[in-house]
Image: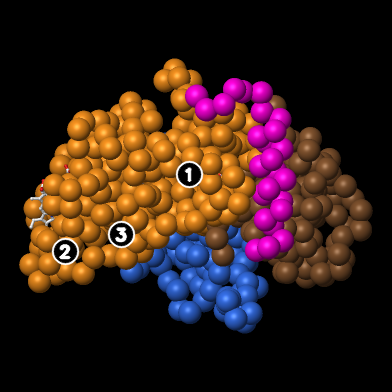
Chain colours: A blue, B brown, C orange
Amino acid sequence: MTARALINVPPKAKRGEIIGIKSLISHEMETGFRPDATGQPIPRNIIKEFVCTYNGVEVFRAEFFPAMSANPFVSFTTVANESGTITMTWTGDNGFFATESVAITVE
Amino acid sequence: MTDTLPLMATRRRFLIGAAGLAGGMALVTMLPGRTAATPASMQAAVKAVAGDAPMNKGRIKIELPPLVENGNAVPLGIKVESPMTDAGHVKAIHVFTEKNPQPNVVSFQLGPRAGTANISTRMRLADTQVVLAIAEMSDGSFWRDEVEVVVTMAACLEES
Amino acid sequence: MIAWMPVWRIVAAAAIVCATYPAIAEIPMSERKSGYEFMGPDSRAMQDEDTANPGMLSVLDGEALWKRKAGAAGKSCADCHSDARTSMKGVAARYPAFSPAVNRPVNLEQRINMCRTDRQQAKPFPYESKDLLSLATFVGRQSRGQPISVADDENTRPFIDNGRAAFTRRQGQLNLSCAQCHDDNWSGRLAGSPITQAQPTGYPIYRLEWQSVGSLQRRLRNCLTGLRAESPALGAPQLVDLELYLMWRARGMPMETPAVRP
């Protein structure tokens, strides 16, 4: 099954307003440091990178390490400067890739 | 009603010993920030992002709850004082821990388009240790904040 | 495994020995509290806000499954039940419910699997599988805020009584009953964790300890393991009866699915 993501961006904002953005994605964030039943380490499987763009311009980026919780949650802010699309992408081990976009209207 | 907490405090070592097997159901308390020497791997990770630049105290603030209910998902807040303009803004924030197998937790890159440097996320804390956050400013200065988080492990109820 | 057992024993003994309450009394209705009320502000916030609650990811998975055709019948849940927001509202709050087909109560997961096998003609989902949990969480979500209202009638009463007996019986190597912790010492702590009243209001829950969503039966088995008592298999009638008793005990309390718990 594909990864599920939840993002929260206000649908409307005033020009220049600082808006809060929240993102949550399903991912086990297997650290690579845990042994399995036979004592062998379970291979690392994490999201490594999270990027948020606003009409194609990068506004926020995060690099994740195994100490991030499972189902990573990140909240941050951005300046609403024009109407358009806010896009988030997550990339990780084993070819993991997920993306979500929402529209925002700026008045 | 009787509270067993004081008893637990005296049994902390015992409980931490059990934790390796049992996983983390944690009671965490915070002690005031401490600037004792940190393990080499964390210092090396700090050096990798900041080189030998001097570390200033202030401007950045770590928020961790006084009572962490489970070390698997510890809410972490970071705020940096900055006008967040082209002329003066936070470029990056890096979070480290002392005793995890790997010192890095997360690194953020931001700029004037972020509007503020006010971030929250969730991290894993499996043991008593120092959490350190460093902010890199557009003027090249570095600012740090650190807190020691005491993680008391309890017997977990999950069969494993 | 062996190393932590004495810890639990010491801790449990301390909690019980220090207790000032008289033995076994059901919690008065007015004093009942969900596990939510024992959590700190951060965990509450995680439950309250959909974008912060990882259980909601399971609800989304369940919604997708609800709409997907499956089995030899080639039907989706939605084909028969249409919009879950109306058809499933309040349903989870009535489970476990008596099923004439098996002449005993079945829990929500089992009820969903009955539709899998009988109506979709598909293989049942294994207990605790991602798919079954997602559907149960999605169906449960439609009852959020609805009062728990399992049937208390001649069909269900013997099973409620079974569950109560299991709850109040001393068991395991620790020779403790569920009630000794959850009826008599719910405001105490065990190794730093609030004991709570074991109210089943939020299931399936996202448990931080598990780093995933899990069922009430999984949670019950955790407590049984803690007592070093025999843990019936997932889906076993004893566990369904215990679930039914807990839901009866929580009658009238609002559903919180998907709740977050430490």
Q: CA distance from mark 3 to mark 2?
A: 13 Å
Q: Chain of mark 3?
A: C
Amino acid found under the numbered disc labelled 3: Leu
Q: Closer to the observer: label 1 or label 3? A: 3
Label 2's element?
helix
| Chain-order first, disc 1 or disc 3 | 3
Q: Is residue C14 magenta?
A: yes
Residue C173, position in %: x, y?
60, 51
State the extent of the magenta-drawn residues as a range: C1-25
Label 3's element?
helix
Disc sitting over residue C260 in the figure: 1
Label 2 sits on residue: C117
Q: Is residue B93 magenta?
A: no
Amino acid found under the numbered disc labelled 1: Val
Q: Nearer the viewer, residue A22 or B137?
A: A22
Q: Residue at x 24, y 45 (%)?
A: C105
User: Does A34 sit above or below residue C136?
Assistant: below
Q: Chain of mark 1?
A: C
User: Does C122 sit above or below residue B26?
Assistant: below
**Disc 1 residue crowd, few under 14, some 14–19, many 20+, Cα 10 Å:** many
Amino acid found under the numbered disc labelled 2: Thr
Q: CA distance from mark 1 to mark 3?
A: 18 Å
Is residue A101 found left or right of A23 in the rendered image? left
